[in-house]
Image (cartoon, rainbow, N blue to C red):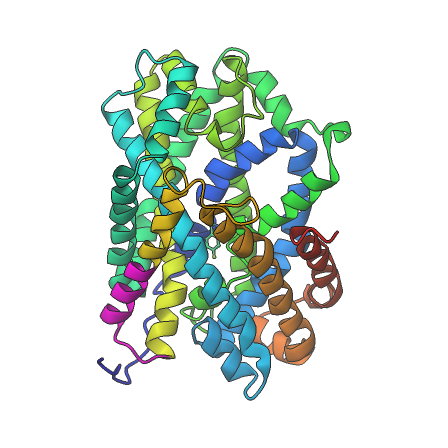
Amino acid sequence: MATQPVTQRDSFTSKIGIIAAVAGSAVGLGNIWKFPYITGVFGGGAFVLVYLICIALIGLPVMLSEFIIGRKAQRNAVGSFKKLAPGTLWFMPGIMGLVAAFMILAFYGVVAGWTLEYLLKSVLNAFAGKNPADLEGMFGGFISQVTKPIIWQCVFMGLTGWIVLAGIKGGIERASKLLMPILLMIIIILDIRAITLPGAAEGLAFLFKPDFSKLSAEGMLSALGHAFFSLSLGMGTLITYSSYMGKRENLATTAVQVTVADTVIALLAGIAIFPAVFAFGIEPGAGPGLVFITLPNVFQQMPGGYFFCLLFFLLLAVAALTSSISILEVVVAYFVEELKLGRRAATIMATVAITIAGIPCSLSMGVMSNVQFMGKTFFDWLDFIAANILLPLGGLLIVAFVGWYLGREKTETEVTNEGELKAGYLPLFMFLAKFVAPVVIAIVFLHGLGLF
Ligand code: PFF
């Protein structure tokens, strides 16, 4: 295996490229597929409000912590901890992140593959004349097949690997700068369509008018868990990305901009979906099938539906791609820097291994649905271990590392770019990083294990 020559590390080249790439990582299936359906399941406005509070109080400090670690160390998720805390066990959160990246991308690639099939179905107008029961059968029939979903998963993973292979500026930054504006445009077009539907007000009220009687403890905890997933936190993705940022970037501003962008796009996705759901009398709490079963039905009934349906699945596929590349980069950067593989070998190995791990995930929707351990399929296990255990625990350790191990002085040096910038928010950040974030995350973690 080729040893990497000692060359200058690849990096992002512009501020806009950084925002596009980090926002591209954050904005994904989590925003457009998951946020609307869990908002529906947990009753609407009040859940949204709790989610926003979690984003501000927990999400933002964890994001800034990842930026501080990555930009300071200029290494991959594991190497960064090794460099900043040599001879300690602090590299463990990096290893956990690596494992989480592997697991999340395995099942993310499967769901992303479904979006490609649905994009093709939209092009072919395959939803025309189908009633809701037909569409449910169509979705169930598709995901339970053996070969077709795996082929789409391989196509999607191939695309992901192809972009990552081209490196940071030539691959990830370029693709994000091209795809993110497309995504924003599509979602705004969909929003305009949605809010001009007759009866749209009811959908908007569902999303924005908090009704606290509908808020459950489980809803609150899910809001926090989702804040992690949606902002790509807890597994070193943003440690890896920020390691490619220049020493003059303002980390705090970038964190705020990306957090706002991710949140606005989740809300825009809700605005695109709920007015339509209400206008056509569909159950908002329909669950994970909301996007794949309900929306083709909604689109069919609206003027211009063919076009808007196609745009919607294109949006979903694009959003998934800019997220999946960030997950793959966590593994590739580790292979290159810690295992000294060439980037090409690293990318091919990581892509192939993760795709193979995704195959049983795909099969667990059909032929392997009976292969269960404690009532969960392979797909469910990967999702559960990664999202409910590794991400919260990783996030807790990351924020505690900055709050307690690096401490105020080193943190200040990093966020002020060695004294160039002002950081009046520092006392608040240190308080959130040392106390608030770790305690609240610990509660979610215990909940994830079913201990609380
Ligand atoms: N944030 C992505 C989404 O909302 O779909 C998913 C994700 C990407 C999670 C990267 C974690 C991660 F490290």
**Which residue occupies 31% across, 80% down?**
340
Compared with residue 142, is residue 412 higher up or lower down, i.e. above or below?
A: below
Q: Which of 340 and 169 is in front in this view?
A: 340
Please indicate whether residue 392 sits to the left or right of residue 158 in the image: right
From which residue to which does the magenta span run? 339-353
**Residue 24 place in picture, x, y as percent:** 41, 50
**Residue 364 place in picture, x, y as percent:** 41, 43
Can residue 420 be seen here? The reply is: no
* Quadrant of the image occupied by residue 316: top left
Magenta stretch, main secondary structure, is helix
- Quarter of the image containing the N terminus? bottom left
**Which residue occupies 63% across, 68% down?**
397
Compared with residue 438, is residue 362 higher up or lower down, i.e. above or below?
A: above
Can residue 50 be seen here? The reply is: yes
Q: Seen from this angle, which residue lies furthest right? A: 213
Please indicate whether residue 85 sits to the left or right of residue 427 in the image: left
**Residue 326 place in picture, x, y as percent:** 40, 58
**Residue 20 place in picture, x, y as percent:** 40, 52
Compared with residue 204, is residue 234 higher up or lower down, i.e. above or below?
A: below
**Which residue occupies 63% across, 73% down?**
401
User: Number of numbered discs present?
Assistant: 0
Q: Nearer the viewer, residue 395 or 218?
A: 218
Q: Which of 259 and 136 is in front in this view?
A: 136
325 falls in the magenta region: no
**Which residue occupies 45% across, 54% down?**
104
Compared with residue 407, is residue 200 higher up or lower down, i.e. above or below?
A: above
Please indicate whether residue 83 sits to the left or right of residue 323 in the image: right
